[in-house]
Image: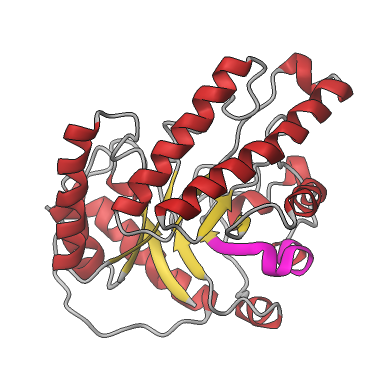
């Protein structure tokens, strides 16, 4: 298993590619990142976007970092997206995904993904409308994965959400979606299993566990995302945290499911107002915890003692 980190921590803090690349390599001792479109919006004009893409790739290459994948990020996870009730809005969402595929490929990533969208109150309460949206969603994913394949990407990563109006939101819906996509996509369309969200008690109950999702979805899981929470929210704290919870090691469950080769991406969103050294300490501690959680060795590498 390869441990990496989502670059959401860099948003508004280390936006310069050279800064986050050095920090990931030297302070965290990692060689893999998941890019977030919070740092580069696919909607930006190509003439300006291309300059930034080249700068990002140069920084990653200079610090021997692999940009494993690119994800939607928080800025684009709010819109109804591919489940919008307006056909024109759904068409725009598909166009956004095509541009996201372009940017991901230009960055050198092999996968792109994120949440697919959210139903409105009205359509979520209407079984017929909900079924129509879900059927059309299959067509949209087929088209997006076809575009992604032509762009050179190898995987499409779907992020389940515990929010009831998003799709997929439950383990059953994940299985339903995987079954509906079977044989339709030119590249694998599977799931990012976000550990913190899989443990969300208000949605999944007090017995919710990562192992339940791993055992049920198996090879449909294409990435593990590791974050901390209190089982009642989605704050994405690091470890240790006074309101968070530890995690029992899941390496055995991952190995038993044949998922040892998956990337495991740590996601930490530092609290607003934290200074540079507080941010660094929180991230270093979280990486150390995740190595134990996933049964990974601590590497030897260049280290520095401050964050600038």
Horizontal relation, residue 49 to residue 153: left or right: left
Residue 305 point in image, percent of width and height: 14, 67
Residue 184 point in image, percent of width and height: 70, 52
* Count of residue discs: 0
Horizontal relation, residue 267 to residue 46: left or right: right
Residue 284 point in image, percent of width and height: 32, 65
Furthest residue toward right = 127
Instruction: Report the residue at 53% width, 72% height from top.
Output: 262
Instruction: Report the residue at 17% width, 50% height from top.
Output: 54
Residue 112 seen in the figure: no
229 to 222, vertically: above or below = above
Q: Which residues are magenta?
A: 213-224
Residue 101 placement: quadrant: top left
Q: Nearer the viewer, residue 243 or 65?
A: 65
Residue 256 seen in the figure: yes
Residue 223 part of the magenta segment:
yes
4 to 72, vertically: above or below = below
Main SS, magenta region, reads helix
Instruction: Report the residue at 66% width, 80% height from top.
Output: 258
């Amino acid at each position: 298993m390869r441990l990496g980190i989502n670059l959401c921590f860099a948003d508004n803090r280390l936006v310069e590619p050279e800064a986050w690349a050095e920090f990931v390599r030297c302070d965290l001792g990692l060689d893999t990142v998941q890019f977030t479109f919070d740092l580069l919006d696919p909607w930006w004009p190509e003439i300006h976007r291309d300059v930034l893409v080249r700068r990002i790739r140069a920084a990653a290459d200079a610090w021997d970092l692999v940009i494993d994948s690119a994800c939607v990020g928080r800025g684009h996870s709010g819109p109804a997206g591919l489940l919008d009730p307006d056909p024109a809005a759904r068409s725009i969402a598909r166009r956004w995904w095509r541009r996201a595929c372009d940017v991901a490929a230009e960055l050198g990533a092999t996968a792109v993904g994120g949440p697919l969208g959210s139903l409105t109150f009205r359509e979520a309460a209407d079984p017929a409308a909900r079924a129509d949206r879900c059927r059309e969603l299959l067509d949209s994913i087929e088209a997006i994965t076809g575009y992604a394949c032509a762009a050179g990407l190898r995987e499409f990563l779907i992020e389940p959400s515990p929010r009831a109006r998003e799709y997929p939101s439950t383990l059953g819906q994940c299985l339903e979606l995987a079954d509906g996509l079977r044989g339709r996509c030119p590249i694998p369309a599977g799931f990012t299993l976000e550990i913190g969200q899989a443990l969300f008690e208000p949605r999944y109950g007090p017995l919710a566990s990562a192992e339940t999702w791993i055992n049920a979805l198996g090879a449909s899981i294409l990435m593990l995302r590791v974050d901390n929470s209190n089982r009642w929210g989605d704050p994405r704290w690091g470890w240790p945290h006074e309101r968070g919870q530890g995690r029992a090691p899941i390496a055995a469950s991952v190995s038993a499911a044949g998922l040892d080769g998956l990337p495991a991406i740590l996601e930490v969103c530092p609290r607003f107002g934290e200074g540079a050294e507080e941010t660094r300490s929180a991230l270093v501690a979280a990486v150390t915890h995740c190595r134990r959680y996933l049964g990974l060795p601590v590497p030897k590498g260049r280290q520095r003692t401050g964050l600038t």
